[in-house]
Image (cartoon, rainbow, N blue to C red):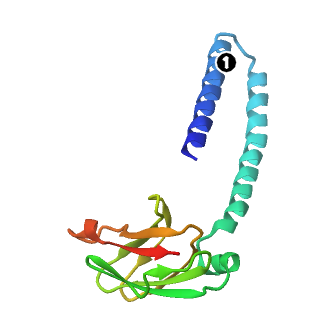
Amino acid sequence: MQVGVGVVFFLFVILWTAVLWWVATRASRPTPYEAVTRVVSWLRRWGTLAVLVVLAIAFVVSLFFLPYRASRAARLGEPSVTVEVTGRMWAWELSRTTLPLGQTVEFVVTATDVNHGFGIFAPDGRLVTQVQAMPGYTNRLLYRFDEPGTYTIRCLEFCATGHHVMRTEFVVE
């Protein structure tokens, strides 16, 4: 993914450089005012429309990836396993440490002291999902584990001096 983004960025830089070079070489020639206003008017009209269309498409596509419970439940199905999670300085308490592979799991997350960031990391170190753990409030997170292995939970919200040791693990099999 990062290589693809890098290639797209590199191509964009080349295109941008070509456009700037083209503008610089044309700048020495006098252009009638009417021609300039005609081009600017065309760019304003169609450029604005193009930007609005691209933003509308991006908005509609992003609706399918909302992290909210209702949209996740529609995509993942109702949970077959529930894990109660409590965050406190500087530990996570889980009601289960072995979870089933390929089934929807619901994490019921809260905290007893301060805000904590409940982040689940895959065996290869990728952050796969996260939610806030807050005192006096319960967040519900749905996720389906499609890879077996040992997953790590880390705190993503600085919670005090022992923040770096706030981690635990569970196994998906």
- Assign a secondary structure to mark 1: helix
Identify the residue shown where x is 64% and y is 15%. Answer: 27
Identify the residue shown where x is 70% and y is 79%. Answer: 74
As drawn, 10 above or below 29: below
Using the image as rendered, state which of residue 89 and residue 126 is in the foreground: 126
Percent coordinates x, y for residue 159 in the rendering: 28, 71
Query: Does residue 151 appear to the left or right of 102 in the view shown?
Result: left
As drawn, 11 above or below 56: above
Q: Amino acid at mark 1?
A: Trp
Please tell me how crowded label 1 is: few (under 14), some (14-19), or many (20+) other residues with Cα within 10 Å.
few
Identify the residue shown where x is 71% and y is 47%. Answer: 51
Percent coordinates x, y for residue 102 in the rendering: 62, 75
Total numbered badges shown on the rendered structure: 1
The outermost residue toward the front is 173
Location of mark 1 (residue): 22
As drawn, 57 above or below 35: below
Percent coordinates x, y for residue 162 in the rendering: 22, 70
Quarter of the image where one finds residue 137: bottom left
Query: Does residue 29 appear to the left or right of 110 in the view shown?
Result: right
Percent coordinates x, y for residue 62 in the rendering: 67, 62
Using the image as rendered, state which of residue 68 and residue 55 is in the foreground: 68
The outermost residue toward the left is 161
The outermost residue toward the top is 29
Using the image as rendered, state which of residue 100 and residue 83 is in the foreground: 100
Query: Does residue 43 appear to the left or right of 149 in the view shown?
Result: right
Identify the residue shown where x is 55% and y is 80%. Answer: 100
